[in-house]
Amino acid sequence: MAELAVELRDVVKTFKTPEGGTVNAVDHVDMQIRDGEFFSMLGSSGCGKTTSLRMIAGFEWPTSGEVYIHGKAMGHKPPFQRPVNTVFQSYALFHHMTVFQNIAFGLEMENAPKNEVQSRVGRVLEMVKLNGMEKRYPKQLSGGQQQRVALARALVKTPDVLLLDEPLGALDLKLRKEMQIELKALQQQVGITFVYVTHDQEEALTMSDRIAVMSHGKVMQLGTPVEIYERPANKFVADFIGESNFLRGTLKSREGKNGMVALQDLQGEVRGEVVGDLSVGSSVVVSARPEKVRVAEKPAINQNFFPGKVSHSTYIGSDSRLVIDLGGASIVSREQNKISTLDPSAYYRDGQEVFVTLFPENTLILPAD
């Protein structure tokens, strides 16, 4: 097993509320981040991800529990005594300094020899593709270039761990997507552990080796992008990552991972894969991703199918989004547009009668809460 770069052991961070009470922004979190991996903390605002990052950085200290970096307890060490560096969303560049001076600032504060400063700054400028821009000032750079300067300034100090707090948040969508690919390539090039905070699920799925999905100060699931998308641990994760259909019911029978659910809002039963330690009689939700819901004029298999009517069809280029009324519940399907045609009969239309099939291997049975 790879050495751990960062570990949070039973970490709690409590803040006082304006009303005089307390709230656990981070609530008994255990997290192990491996050396050299791109690790993301993902969640909506207030989930505890940024507070967790700030405790690794040393800007906040745990109320209880401990943060370890390469096996050493950090205790109440301030940020400058930790082998980490942080890149913020705001960039925090010095606007009266050139690109070179911004990047060299930390090294000069440590009285590094001039020739070493020159060579190290030159090396990181090459890494972030800013060669030839050393004499420019931040105001003469685009948003993406400013972000690269902030990255270079953090990387030039060769930290063991680079912490990134929503660093692409201020960029437009196209540039943001380009920077995601560049960031991942850069991380692989330098081999440093990246700990990345974001609320953008697609961003986390694109770049991360592993992701911790957080909510209300707790880690809901920790795994690879494929694990989190294909086998979410609970309804929250299935709902937060991507889009999912949910049908309520009761677990009627179970054999290993295979289960049968009696549906609450529809006549019938659904077979699928049971996630977690659910017993017969448990209230459950059946989860199916829209792109894995099969829509056709007749059932695809002799189980898990329901007659329905297309209540809303939206053509969106690469695929069509269908909302199908099953008479008691509705379900969303995404049908890939595999043929190039203007023939309207090639696409489903509002009011068309269809059959919806949920293949058991793509149908998950999750705890209801």
Image (cartoon, helix red, strand yellow):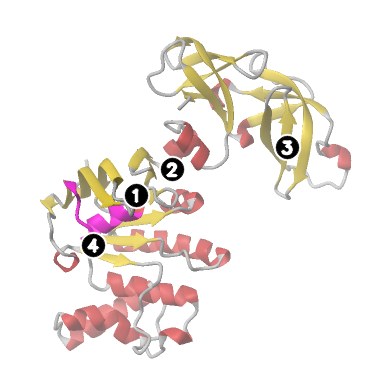
Q: Residues within 10 Å of mark 3 (few under 14, many from 20)?
A: many
Judge whether residue 2 can be spotted in this image: no
Q: Nearer the viewer, mark 1 or mark 2?
A: 1
Task: State the residue in front, 263 or 64.
Answer: 64
| Image coordinates for residue 188, horizontal then vertical, percent | 35, 58
| CA–CA distance in space, label 3 to label 4 | 47 Å
Kindly identify which numbered label has been placed on residue 322.
Answer: 3
Badge 3 or badge 2: first in the primary sequence: 2
Position of 47 compared to 201: left or right?
left
Q: What range is drawn magenta here?
A: 50-64
Report the residue marked by disc 1: 48
Please check the rendered image and state whether residue 58 is part of the magenta-colored stretch, yes or no: yes
Q: Amino acid at mark 3?
A: Leu
Report the residue marked by disc 4: 59
Q: Residues within 10 Å of mark 4 (few under 14, many from 20)?
A: few
Q: Secondary structure at mark 2?
A: helix
